[in-house]
Amino acid sequence: MTTLQPDSHPEPSGKFCTAAEAVRRFVQNGQTITLGGFTVNRNPMALAREIIRQGIRDLHLVVHSHGQAMDLLIGAGCVGRIEIAYGGTGRFAPTCIRFKKAAEEGTLEVEDYSNYQMSLRFLAGSLGLPFIPCLTGLGTDIERLSGFSPDTRNNPNVADRKMIPMDNPFRPGGRVLLLPALNPDVALIHAQSVGDDGTVRIRGLTFADVEQAKSAGRVIVSCERIVPAAELRDDPSQNVLPGFMVDAVVLAPWGAHPTACHFHYDYDPGHLRMYGQVARDEALFQRYLKDWALDPVDPEAYLGLLNPADRTALTADPRLGYAPGLDRR
């Protein structure tokens, strides 16, 4: 299969660009952004590292369940508040370390929802609805307690209420919760392939990426490969976003590392274990940021940090989509 470089695209729209250019054009201080992927799967790491390099601050993150990219952004001081269902990287950090530290120290405002509720909120935003009803959460602390302050609620980018219980108008005696829709300014997604017309293909679980992208004002997609559009037409059922919905495409091989990208590479147990240790110590974490986020200025430089033997061990089996012999201890 032919893999195209960004400069080989006729580029009438200018959407094929570097991570630095995409972030500079579309991500600003104080915006609401959402991250695709899930815990240790398909995090948009190359884009998150670029946000850190550009010193963007006071971001409002909205995610359903997330992990490494979220934790890195919070640890680097880029995030002021977050709406989330869960933040962790499995056994490497059942709760993301810098996320937990910031919440405990009061430097991060946290509003929690269930996974299903966050997915519904993105769905509502993607459909152009102001809110969406659900049954889950009734009578729980998720309904009863709110993490955002009254001052935060006055922000025009934040819903006036976390959720609102009401009677079901179609079934007397029944109750529902109304959840506010989410419409982030920017969605950051990592995909396996993008066509030279901007069509996005995600192989394997899409999590809430499609709804997140459709609910957002701008969409930046990093990817493992840029391919001829004809290649993606061979099996269009695997394509998730048309090119006209994508504002920027960034070629970033291994751009989800140390999280997994199905059919390309597995998550990196050694790196995640190392991160889990250094993230607990402020000096070690700052050194990690320098070595792994600030100094490698592009995906190619980041690849140079990875041991070739480790990359071989992480490379996914082309039939299974993951690395079956990987030592995950």
Image (cartoon, helix red, strand yellow):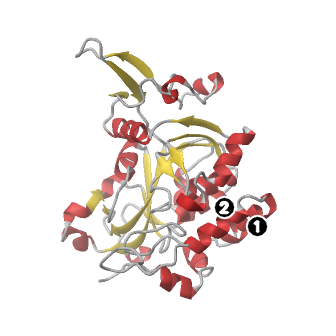
| 167 left or right of 154 in image | left
Q: Which numbered marker is on residue 287?
A: 1
Residue plotted at (53% across, 69% down): 257
Alpha carbon separation for disc pair 2 and 1? 14 Å
Residue 164 image point, x, y percent: 44, 20
| 279 left or right of 329 in image | right
Q: Nearer the viewer, residue 138 or 198?
A: 138
Give the residue at the far bottom of this rendering: 309
Residue under numbered circle 2? 53
Q: Tags 2 and 1 in contact by the CB under 8 Å rule?
A: no
| 60 left or right of 276 in image | left
Residue 23 image point, x, y percent: 55, 57
In the rendered structure, which amino acid carries the disc numbered 2?
A: Arg
Q: Nearer the viewer, residue 317 or 244?
A: 317
**Residue 190 sits in quarter:** bottom left
Residue plotted at (36% across, 80% down): 317
Instruction: Tell me the SS state at disc 1.
Output: helix
Residue 232 image point, x, y percent: 24, 69
Instruction: Tell me the SS state at disc 2.
Output: helix
Q: Residues within 10 Å of mark 1 (few under 14, many from 20)?
A: some
Quick one: label 2 or label 1, which is nearer the N terminus?
2
In the rendered structure, which amino acid carries the disc numbered 1?
A: Arg
Residue plotted at (51% across, 59% down): 22
Q: Nearer the viewer, residue 295 or 171?
A: 171
In the rendered image, the quadrant that contains the C terminus is: bottom right
Q: How many marks?
A: 2
**Residue 109 sits in quarter:** top right
Residue 177 image point, x, y percent: 39, 24
In the rendered image, the quadrant that contains the N terminus is: bottom left
